[in-house]
Image (cartoon, helix red, strand yellow):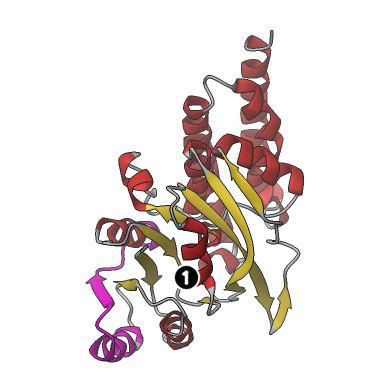
Amino acid sequence: MNKFSIIIPCYNAGLYIKKCLDSIIAQSYQNFEIIIVNDGSTDDSLKIINEYQNTYKNIICISQANNGVAYARNIGIRNITGNKFIFVDADDYINPELLWNLNETLKNKDTDIVRYNAYLINNGNKNIDKYFLKKFNTIDGKSALKMFVDSKITYGPLWLYCYDTNFFKNNNFFFIQNKIHEDFYNIFILSMAGSIQGIEYIGYNYVKNPHSITSNKNITGEIRRSLDILYMYDYVTNKLEESFKDCREDLDYIYGDISMFLNIPLKYLHGRNREKYMKEINIRKLARERIYENNWW
């Protein structure tokens, strides 16, 4: 029987955390633990968490000074006791049969990653198109990435996947601290999987939150975002070069899609800031073209 660990980074999520926790507690499959990392919340998040913790013995709360979501996720991973785990953001919630579907899929299997589907909820409206992918049988991670690119759906978010604990820890995966879009690293994680399987169950509800860090559209925030994106792009693509070293043509196949990550800030940067950022994009594009030419045979 699989035991699932559910990692929830929480920072000032007092308006949302009850719905999130209730959706997990209501799961039809009950062999799980909830690990909440309270990342220095200053609202009533911790008070609410403590109330739930006093009622449900499978809730673990770890409180720390505010160090960001990547640090919180890393702390959560270090403390899991389940053989499988998922990430849930504190302002999102899951559907009642998610863990049951995952357990049924993983019976008598040692699959590294299982992908499920999600709703995008924006102003109360549900949309499935952005994250829906039909069921697929077990394939390796590099083949899965090619399929994801072909499907033209969003495949990067951590909350679309259930991870095997040994796979994650044996590869020493960790999230880069103090960077926006730190979950871009998940593309490297996916590439390293020996086995990925997809189920059609819509297990997750991603609630578009106008107050989130990535929804902050002031110029200071956008400059920081652009710098973080450049950093994460460089870090992850270097890791992918290692991962795909024996099948470079597969990396070339998905590279155009991965490079779209660099375009995120362009909608909000203007004038001199936009020019500087475009220069950085072009530097990386030229560098990639040189790598491609040197490895073409």
Callout 1: 10 Å neighbours few (<14), some, many (20+)? many
Magenta-colored stretch includes residue 46: yes
Quarter of the image containing the N terminus? bottom left
158 relative position to 35: left or right: right
10 relative position to 93: left or right: left
- Residue 99 vertical placement versus 12 (above, below): above
Tell me the amino acid under the disc marked 1. Answer: Asp
Q: Where is residue 144 in the image (x, y as percent from the top left)?
A: 62, 42
State the extent of the magenta-drawn residues as a range: 45-71
Q: Where is residue 149 in the image (x, y as percent from the top left)?
A: 71, 43
Q: Where is residue 273 in the image (x, y as percent from the top left)?
A: 63, 47
> Which residue corresponds to the image point at 26% horizontal and 75% vertical from the top-left?
61
Task: Report which residue position mark 1 lands on.
Answer: 89
> Which residue corresponds to the image point at 69% horizontal and 7% vertical from the top-left?
297
Q: Is residue 9 visible?
A: yes
Q: In which quarter of the image is residue 72?
A: bottom left
Judging depth in this view, the residue of 259 and 153 nearest the camera is 153
